[in-house]
Image (cartoon, grey):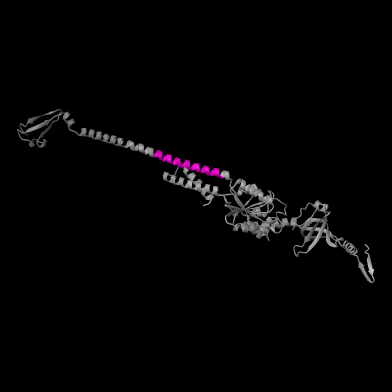
Amino acid sequence: MKVEAIDYGDRRVFSVGAFNRGIASWLSRLPTVWVEGEVTELRRQARWASVFFTLKDPADGACLGVSMPRGQFDGLRLDLADGDRVHVYGRPELFEPKGEFRLRALSLERFGLGEHLAALERLKQKLAAEGLFAPERKRPLPLLPKRIGLVTGNDAAAKRDVITALTTRFPPARVLVAETYVQGPRAPGAIVETLGALCREPDVEVIVVARGGGSFEDLLPFSDERLVRAIANCPVPVVSAVGHEQDTPLCDLAADARASTPSVAARLVVPDLAELVQRLDRARSSLERGTRRALDRERQRLDRTHERLGRAPRLLLERRRGRLDQAAARLTALSPRATLERGYAIVRRAGGIVRSGNAVTSGEAVDVELAEGGFGARVEETR
Amino acid sequence: MTFEEAQKELEEIVRRLETGEAPLDEALKLWQRGEELYRLCKEQLDSAEGKIEELAGRAEAAKP
């Protein structure tokens, strides 16, 4: 393109437009290249023909303006956010009306999905080898935490969902909400800090880390090594409620429990109040029943004992009578009466039974006892 | 004593009472203790008031 100059004597002077046109024309001859950087200051409006953002070099902070036709940008459906790393394919361009240099993007790729995945897998292997995800590391969650720490972003959805789920199940729940970054490069450090701050609060006995679903990149901070380690080493048990069922950020593996939805998180963290009260009341009525049964048993035993006590004297008497009868029978067996019946007689004198003729003298009076009656006699002679 | 401990002990007491092995004086002691534990649990539930607080200041400070 021919650039016209005005000659003032020996000085060639270009108008601004001409200068810009010249530079633009010169730039346009440069080759198309790939440039890598982080997206910042993304500006997109429906009425603009182009989308603008600044590409930043994460190493030294160098910046480069980028523009891309809006239709093309939208067609890629990249859903870019600040901090995302991209490869831009384009050529240098000067926006002539403003003399602004920038990169005109022809194509745009999110960088490193595969790389991220590979790095993630390596990290996972490494942490697993250290035993960070071991089942024996998992701590039981308290049945009734005095206070629940909730780490969440300041966008309402995840926070509201978890709080609603918690208070529905257990209205007296005490929740300490700590808002922080849950997305972007600042998120891991911020979440680690927040975890620490919650642990220092009194009575926080369990912490829920909650974040709604999002793209793979959105959830990357939750696989950050610092954060994963902080969760594994957190003095308070942690429930990871990050993303959806199909997402498994590494923090899920390090946490003491994993919840795929806010209501699962609530089930893990607080008891069902109605159920708890019911269980407690059941225990109490069983307590009363059990005690009453013990009492009844004792009463019955006492009654039985009392009854036996009442029977005891009669039993004693009967036993005595029996023994008396026995003694009487033996007495009868031993008495001389039977002998007398057979015709024997007992001769007595004043001194007792006469067993020998020498014991009496002639003329002495003796008494003779027979089986029936007896008589007095006088000794005629002795032999 | 935590709620959990109290509830656990309460249920253990109930179990022992239900086996009917405890002699009366022990059963009465268990019952007394059980009632105490029940009250403890109930109080903890009743006294707990739902509360949503924000760790605002500190979270802010935590942001880099």
A31 sits left or right of A227 in the view: right
Q: In the rendered image of this protein, does residue A152 appear above or below residue A25? A: above
A250 sits left or right of A351 in the view: right
Q: Does residue A108 show up?
A: yes
- What residue occupies the far top of the structure in this picture? A372
Nearer to the camera, A80 or A161: A161
Q: Does residue A229 show up?
A: no
Where is residue A294? Give x, y as percent.
44, 41
The C terminus of chain A - image quarter: top left
**Which is the main secondary structure of the residues drawn in magenta?**
helix
Q: What stretch is highlighted in magenta?
A: A276-301
Nearer to the camera, A193 or A214: A193
Is A369 included in the stretch rendered in magenta?
Answer: no
Q: In the rendered image of this protein, does residue A169 appear above or below residue A107? A: above
Residue A94 lies in quadrant = bottom right
Q: Which residue is drawn at 61% across and 47% down?
A: A167
Is A281 included in the stretch rendered in magenta?
Answer: yes
Nearer to the camera, A61 or B9: A61
Where is residue A214? Give x, y as percent.
71, 51
The N terminus of chain A - image quarter: bottom right
Where is residue A147? Give x, y as percent.
59, 53
